Amino acid sequence: MNENRLSGIEQPQYRPLSRDDPMHWASLPRTQTMWFRDVGPRLGIDAPKMILGQVLNKIVEDDANAYTLVHSDFSDSGTITISKKKAAIRLSWEIETLETPPAIRKVLREAQTIITEADWHDPEAFERVKGAQENLVAKVTNMMEEDTTLREAYLYAKDREVQNKWQPFWNEFYGR
């Protein structure tokens, strides 16, 4: 892999999608996962734990953003189409991430079927999509409450001290 030096840490050459790309935010976690695998261990980060924590965080706290925009305006076909694509990209990343445990992968696939096959332009179908998302969040939250490993990974990814170790390097890589 070609690498360059930024902030004294060898940084990978791959880049996130342009911020102008409508799929940028949906695809960013996949890039960050690759980055954590490459750079995280050199920063003293438990990369598998961080990646699992990031997946759990996105499921429980972030994915619903794709649905919020649509719910406010069903007349905007472009927003509906882009939001559905963003949800599909995010679900694929969560399912395909090696650190995602099989039980969570199973509930993600169940939700993915409903979410990606529904006609988001139909308000009734969209309500089923939102219900599938809410059910997914509830199931994963329950799994985290019952499984110490999941809960610890989730909290590890949110830990401010851990974030302070990697965020300056990520921000430089990402171009913030």
Image: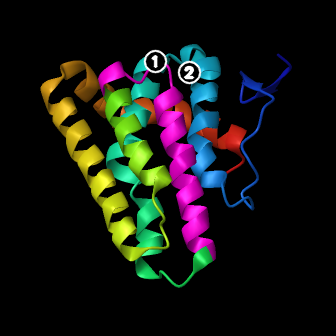
Determine whether 67 is above or below 163 in the image: below
Residues 129 and 69: in front is 129
| Residue 81 magenta-highlighted | yes
Q: Quadrant of the N terminus?
A: top right
Question: Does residue 96 appear anywhere in the picture?
Answer: yes
Instruction: Count neighbours of disc 2 (C-alpha within 10 A) and say few if under 14, some if 14 to 19, many if 20 or more.
Output: many
Per the rendering, the mark at residue 40 is: 2
* Number of marks in the rendered image: 2
Determine whether 40 is above or below 104 in the image: above
Question: Does residue 46 appear anywhere in the picture?
Answer: no
Tell me where residue 83 appears, x and y as whole percent: 54, 63
Determine whether 147 is above or below 20 in the image: above
Name the residue at 38% across, 66% down. Answer: 125
Start and end of the magenta stretch?
78-103
Tell me where residue 39 appears, x and y as whole percent: 63, 21
| Residue 160 magenta-highlighted | no
Name the residue at 20% across, 31% down. Answer: 143
Residues 136 and 153: in front is 136
Tell me where residue 88 appears, x and y as whole percent: 54, 48
Task: Give yes or no for contact between labels 1 and 2 (Cβ–Cβ under 8 Å).
Answer: no
Determine whether 71 is above or below 2 in the image: below
Instruction: Using residue 175 as the reference point, say whether residue 64 is left or right of it.
Output: left
The residue identified by callout 1 is 48
Instruction: Using residue 21 as the reference point, say whether residue 30 is left or right of it.
Output: left
Q: Estimate the spatial distance between the alpha carbons at disc 1 and disc 2, rounded to whole Å.
A: 9 Å
Per the rendering, the mark at residue 145 is: none
